[in-house]
Image (spheres, rainbow, N blue to C red):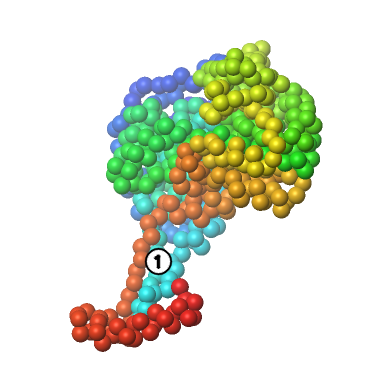
Amino acid sequence: MSGAMNRVDPASLVAGLRATSGDTATIIAPFSGQVLHELPLSSLKDVANAAASARAAQSAWRDAGFAHRRGVLLKAHDLLLERQGELLDTIQTETGKTRGQAFEEVFEGASVTRYYAVSARRVLATRRRRAGIPLVLKTRVSYRPKGLVGVVTPWNYPLALSLMDVIPALAAGNAVIQKADNQGALSILASRRAFIDAGVPAELWTVVTGPGNVIGNALVDAVDHVCFTGSTPTGTSVGVRAAGRLVAASLELGGKNPLIVLDDANATKTAAQAVYAAFSSMGQLCVAIERIYVQRAIAESFTSAFVERTRSLRLSSALDFSADVGSLTSADQLERVRAHVDDAIAKGATVLAGGAARPELGPYFFEPTVLTGVTEPMRCFAEETFGAVVAITVVDSEDEAIAACNASEFALNASVFSGSMARARRVAERLDAGSVNINEGYRASFSSVDAPMGGMKQSGLGRRNGAEGLLRFVEASTIAEATGLLTLPRNGSEFARLRGPMVTLLRALKALRRR
């Protein structure tokens, strides 16, 4: 821990908060259980002042144009990479994840920043559209920023999930007010500092802290678009509150993500990928795998390889790249994981690997756990564990596997492994999921910043990443003009005179296959 604290200065980072209530929250370092720092908490007045100052700064940022914003964001991209040592230390210290998984956050954050810096002008350029009557009318669509975007960011991937929402909002010309989870505030503030140093006005992107039912509600009430990442019940409440003001909300919510192993897959290679997909960041990742369906013909060899690899994982709090798995992030997370495992065992499940806490390594360490015999009465059958617990179920056909995957109320991420790309693609097309990965667990889609990411069913509304992730932050305005070549009918006699030519036009457009 001492190595990290040399590069993690909480006092310097929290200076970037808008938090003057006088109250604080005690933040615990997951690796040690010791106090990391006292986090200042925001008041309702802080939220109101932050919203007002952000709105005041937004017009100049909007008017500065795409070229200016591109330059600032690309400079911030470089600063993220230059400061990755400090960022990795901060993420590890705050969340308890390994250095490799912390690097995934920095990599994703830099990728998203670069992508929106260079693509915002193209995606949001004013475009000509086909007019209702060619030559007589001209139509174009322009996009304008919504104004003030509210972002509510969770603790599990504080840097990556923050930037995946904040950066497209800024690239589109908006201001941002962000509520950081207490356990992820330092990581958010460390990344924000890189953007401020690159030229983003400090008032344009403000960060507040505090309880969701107070500060979070005030944020939702103050903004023109809401981004929320978290549980389905809380996200539903956020969406309802925003809808009461006719404000749109992007909601990335819960998941119970499945992985299918078809009988022509390579058992050893698939097991290696599946272990990472299940236990990355101790399973505290919205797209982590919690259910594995393996065809009977390959079940024994796959399960053996999966269990062997799980048992060989190195658990550690090391602030280097030597660890495979880190710690759970909090006492609440440890209790949830332990409760799911104990419930499954009590109701007849079998533990093939893991299943126990490791307090000698740190207060929140828990062994990555592999279960079989998981049935519907067990909590981990349908509930999201959000911890390093995965259930392996044997199926007799790909149809049975697909049906089991799609039976969940969640539909965020899924994965298919096969020796035949054509077969895997066929299965992927039948899965209910916002993202499907072939021969990879989650990183193929998670890193594809040009493609939309989000959930179906109870896993959320809207998409981040890609053009879709930018268009949520703008309002489309249609501007149509009459050319003067012909005056449209305005009364009965004019309709009678022009009806025939207008019908002829419609038939001609159909014959020409014009839209």
For the residue pair 369 and 205, the one nearer the viewer reads as 369
Residue at horizontal 42 percent and vertical 46 percent from the top: 201
Residue bearing mark 1? 141
Q: Nearer the viewer, residue 429 or 67?
A: 429
Quarter holding the N terminus is: top right
Residue 315 in which image quadrant: top right
Query: What amino acid type is highlighted by mark number 1?
Result: Val
Neighbours of disc 1 within 10 Å: few (<14), some (14-19), many (20+): some
Instruction: Pick the residue in front: 237 or 411.
Output: 411
Q: Is residue 367 left or right of residue 432?
A: right
Look at the picture and state if 426 lies above or below 485: above
Q: Position of residue 391 (x, y in %)?
A: 64, 28
Image quadrant in which the C terminus is located: bottom left
Whether residue 469 is situated above or below residue 502 in the rendered picture: above
Residue 311 place in picture, x, y as percent: 74, 23
Q: Which corner quadrant of the image does residue 308 belong to?
A: top right
Q: Is residue 66 above or below residue 96?
A: below
Q: Tell me residue 224's x, y (percent).
A: 34, 47
